[in-house]
């Protein structure tokens, strides 16, 4: 796990029983989005594992509220330009959220999946011109921007929902929030 040394600002939003949080760079770019938790301490821990230097300040709460709305299945025109997508040069000492061009390409491809649609790991791999389906799965598993980069919309070729860092139940919940029907861990494409 790569930790960053720069100070980030964590903003928090609560809806119902869930806490949402995102970490922002000093330039106002999102460097990490935490998956929602019922416990605020667990949420902060998730971000601090990657960003040990942080302050909590709700100056970006409106953006985090939009992330919560997306989680709950509401459509949003989230501006992907808010995400820190730069890849550092090998000689650079600048920290970055994404480590390789391949990771960025996969994340950008997943970001293009519209609400109400799913794609398979194989389709994502084909789009980024690789046959490394597992490498695509690994890059998706490292997604620092879950919810707004909808890795929950990526499924296995056999229609099963596949894995998710937040757990299978959270992935199912997010897909159901978007109107999908799921039976026996398999997505029914006729919503």
Image (spheres, rainbow, N blue to C red):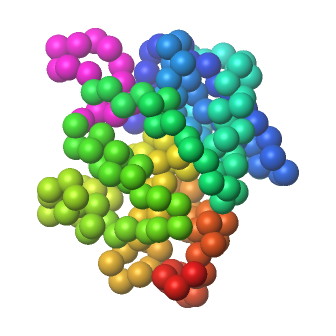
Relative side of 95 to 46, left or right: left
Tell me if I can see residue 71 in this picture.
no
Q: Total label count?
A: 0
Question: Residue 99: where, in percent of width, then height?
Answer: 29, 33
Question: Residue 46: where, in percent of width, then height?
Answer: 59, 38
- Quadrant where the C terminus is found in the figure: bottom right
Q: Residue at x 37, y 68 (%)?
A: 119
Q: Residue at x 46, y 37 (%)?
A: 80
- Quadrant where the N terminus is found in the figure: top left
Tell me if I can see residue 46 in this picture.
yes
Q: Residue at x 53, y 46 (%)?
A: 148
Front residue of 91/130: it is: 130
Residue 138 position by quadrant: bottom left
Q: Residue 177 colored magenta?
A: no
Position of residue 151 relative to residue 11, above or below, is: below
Position of residue 85 relative to residue 160, above or below, is: above
Q: Furthest-front residue in view?
A: 77
The secondary structure that most of the magenta stretch takes on is loop
Relative side of 172 to 2, left or right: right
Relative side of 167 to 44, left or right: left
Q: Residue at x 23, y 13 (%)?
A: 92
Q: Residue 97 colored magenta?
A: yes
Front residue of 77/7: it is: 77
Question: Residue 45: where, in percent of width, then height?
Answer: 63, 34
Question: Residue 44: where, in percent of width, then height?
Answer: 66, 33
Q: Magenta residues?
A: 88-100
């Amino acid at each position: 796990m790569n930790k960053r040394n720069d100070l980030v600002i964590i903003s928090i939003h609560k809806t119902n029983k869930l806490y949402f949080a995102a970490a922002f760079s000093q330039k106002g770019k999102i460097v990490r989005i935490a998956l929602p938790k019922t416990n605020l301490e667990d949420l902060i821990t998730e971000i601090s594992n990657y960003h040990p230097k942080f302050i909590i300040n709700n100056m970006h709460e409106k953006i985090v509220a939009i992330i919560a709305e997306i989680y709950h299945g509401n459509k949003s025109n989230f501006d992907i330009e808010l995400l820190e997508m730069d890849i550092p040069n090998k000689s650079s000492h600048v920290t970055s959220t994404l480590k390789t061009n391949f990771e960025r390409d996969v994340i950008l491809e997943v970001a293009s999946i519209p609400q109400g649609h799913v794609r398979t790991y194989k389709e994502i791999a084909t789009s980024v011109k690789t046959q490394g389906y597992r490498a695509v799965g690994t890059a998706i598993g490292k997604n620092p921007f879950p919810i707004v980069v909808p890795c929950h919309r990526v499924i296995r070729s056999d229609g099963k929902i596949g894995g998710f860092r937040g757990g299978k139940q959270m992935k199912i919940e997010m897909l159901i929030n978007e109107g999908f029907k799921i039976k026996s861990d398999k997505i029914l494409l006729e919503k």
